[in-house]
Amino acid sequence: MSDIAKARETIALHAKSLFDRGLTHGSTGNISVRLPDSSVLVTPTGSSMGFLDPERISHLAANGEHLSGDKPTKEMPLHAAFYETRRKTGAVVHLHSCHSVALSLLPDIDLDNVLPPLTAYGIMLLGKVRLLPFFVPGDPAMGDAVRGLAGKRSAVLLANHGPVVAGENLEAAVNAMEELEATAKLALLLRGVGATALNTDQIGRIVDRFDVDWTLGRTR
């Protein structure tokens, strides 16, 4: 099996896992992986992540030329923006996961850091998560908004839409995405009950131990 075929199989495996656990639904969500030659594999437009045919996953050249597979997701400009601005990005995951979307609708959240510091792993895996405004799905302006962050965020939450996470590889991106959704769920469950979040000293110790650039809101 070729390296591209193996990568396609891995994308389909992770996509089905996310779908089967209800983290994405219908034909929502998309995944991309950057290959060593800088070409990109990405899930096709209109496809269900629970029923992907690996051979039909889109393969794009570094310049965006369509090499094989079905037509890529219309959210490709969003993925491309992370690859362009974060040198170490090897994969991007975008979902419409329920709790993250719900969190994006609340009127009084911190736009610069939408996830409250509830757990160590939320800080370790995500850094600060910026809330971006609403865009019509497929709007290239979403990519422009990510570029405007100048590579300083590994994760964003699109208002009324869903989270996007970049990682060094697909496993890292999926793990971080799952942490984002779990933290969003905790935030909603604990809302209004006066739960004890991590304090500044505790956050500082996590940041120092795991080399998280908390000031700029990104993980190195």
Image: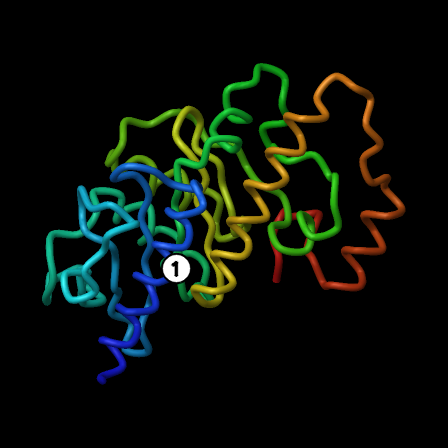
Locate residue 128 relative to residue 44 in the image: left or right.
right
Q: Residue furthest bottom?
A: 1
- Residue 159's x, y, as percent? 44, 26
- Residue 44's x, y, as percent? 19, 51
Query: Which quadrant of the figure contains the N terminus?
Result: bottom left
Taking the spot 11% from the left edge, 52% from the top edge, the residue there is 71
Figure check: 20 above or below 86: above
Q: Quadrant of residue 137?
A: top left
Taking the spot 11% from the left edge, 56% from the top edge, the residue there is 70
Residue at which label 1 appears: 14
Figure check: 59 above or below 190: below
Q: Element type at marker 1? A: helix
- Residue 27's x, y, as percent? 25, 39
Taking the spot 41% from the left edge, 24% from the top edge, the residue there is 160
Between 38 and 53, the one nearer to me in the picture: 53
Locate residue 127 relative to residue 105 in the image: left or right.
right
Query: Which quadrant of the figure contains the C terminus?
Result: bottom right
**Amino acid type for the residue under numbered disc 1:** His
Between 89 and 6, the one nearer to me in the picture: 6
Q: Residue furthest front?
A: 20
Locate residue 9 relative to residue 167 in the image: left or right.
left
